Image (tube, rainbow, N blue to C red):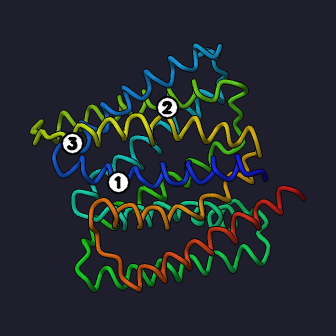
């Protein structure tokens, strides 16, 4: 892995993790589902426009359209929708930590339900991840963290994990950015109806809100996606996935630095244990794929 790939991996992890901080800012001032639906619509327009400029097509196979719908609903509408709702009550750092455990949930479901092989190092990583989550949850709940909000974050991570395993063998075949853009349109449409039914369009306008919204659209929404696919093209999906172990670190540190969220010793210990578990699981699964 060369230095350029390392820098791309670090940039992706930082951009992905920063989305929780900007989302926390947004949902404190605007209805979460309305803003998320609008974000996906704008990001979808940009992604599809770039994809068309790159020569990609929206004439997809049946399997690709299935992936578009499943990921558009499970990742964009359910996973991010529930996280946005939860972050009205849950701190960005905690939401980021829970979301970053998704690789652990995928590995656990693949091992126990899909019966995929998982070496001992991966099993140890799973248990380490569970211990890390328990450390943080114990400390946060004793400190008054909102339990319903935590449950929403956990359900969101489970939704994305199931979607990932359901369509894991579907190839985009050169239409990756187009597929991502179309998934965003599915998410925008799916969130629009509950937003109209259950939310009031009341917004506390400020420069901070406008900046956070456009940052979320352009950086985690579009730029991080482009960097991820460039990284996968450079070093492969399996090696790229190892950078996910950095997400708990970046999620906590960015929320602490920009929002002033508290960072306790227990948080630090839990994050280190979770990150180590994610890295162990990703390396073990990579070993299995190499065969």
Considering the numbered disc 3 on the image, is that residue within a helix, a strand or a loop?
helix
Q: Residue at x 69, y 68 (%)?
A: 281
Quarter where residue 213 is shown: top left
Tell me the mark number nearer the camera, choosing from 3 and 2: 3
Residue 104, how many percent across, how many down?
59, 66
The vertical placement of 58 against 270, above or below, is above
Tell me the mark number nearer the camera, choosing from 1 and 3: 3
Q: Residues within 10 Å of mark 2 (few under 14, many from 20)?
A: many
The vertical placement of 15 against 285, above or below, is above
The answer to which of marks 2 and 1 sits earlier in the sequence is: 1
Q: Is residue 48 left or right of residue 116?
A: left
| Circles 2, 1 touching at the beta carbon (< 8 Å) | no
Residue 222, how many percent across, how many down?
48, 34
Q: Is residue 40 left or right of residue 276?
A: left
Residue 3: numbered disc: none
The vertical placement of 237 against 46, above or below, is below
Q: Residue at x 63, y 29 (%)?
A: 176
Considering the numbered disc 1 on the image, is that residue within a helix, a strand or a loop?
helix
Residue 183: numbered disc: 2
Residue 83: numbered disc: 1
Q: Which residue is mark 3?
A: 209
Q: Nearer the viewer, residue 147 or 142?
A: 142
Q: How many numbered discs sit on the rendered protein?
A: 3
Q: Is residue 153 left or right of residue 102?
A: left
Q: CA distance from mark 3 to mark 2?
A: 25 Å
Q: Is residue 56 left or right of residue 26?
A: right
Considering the numbered disc 2 on the image, is that residue within a helix, a strand or a loop?
helix
């Amino acid at each position: 892995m060369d230095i350029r790939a390392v820098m791309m991996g670090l940039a992706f992890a930082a951009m992905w993790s920063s989305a929780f901080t900007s989302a926390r800012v947004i949902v404190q001032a605007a209805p979460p589902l309305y803003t998320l639906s609008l974000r996906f619509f704008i990001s979808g327009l940009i992604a599809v426009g770039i994809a068309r400029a790159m020569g990609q097509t929206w004439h997809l196979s049946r399997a690709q359209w299935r992936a578009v719908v499943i990921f558009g609903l499970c990742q964009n509408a359910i996973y991010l929708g529930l996280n946005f709702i939860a972050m009205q009550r849950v701190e960005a750092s905690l939401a980021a930590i829970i979301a970053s455990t998704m690789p652990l949930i995928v590995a656990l479901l693949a091992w126990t339900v899909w019966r995929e092989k998982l070496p001992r190092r991966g099993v140890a990583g799973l248990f380490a991840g569970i211990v890390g989550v328990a450390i943080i949850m114990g400390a946060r709940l004793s400190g008054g963290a909102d339990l319903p909000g935590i449950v929403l974050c956990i359900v969101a991570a489970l939704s994305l994990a199931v979607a990932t395993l359901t369509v894991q063998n579907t190839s985009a075949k050169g239409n990756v950015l187009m597929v991502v853009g179309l998934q965003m349109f599915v998410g925008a449409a799916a969130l629009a109806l509950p937003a109209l039914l259950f939310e009031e369009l009341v917004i506390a306008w400020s420069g901070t809100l406008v900046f956070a919204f456009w940052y979320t659209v352009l950086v985690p929404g579009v730029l991080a996606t482009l960097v991820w696919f460039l990284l996968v093209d450079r070093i492969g999906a399996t090696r790229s996935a190892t950078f996910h172990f950095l997400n708990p670190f970046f999620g906590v540190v960015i929320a602490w630095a920009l929002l002033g969220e508290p960072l306790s010793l227990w948080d630090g210990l839990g994050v280190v244990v979770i990150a180590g578990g994610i890295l162990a699981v990703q390396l073990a699964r990579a070993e299995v794929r190499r065969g």
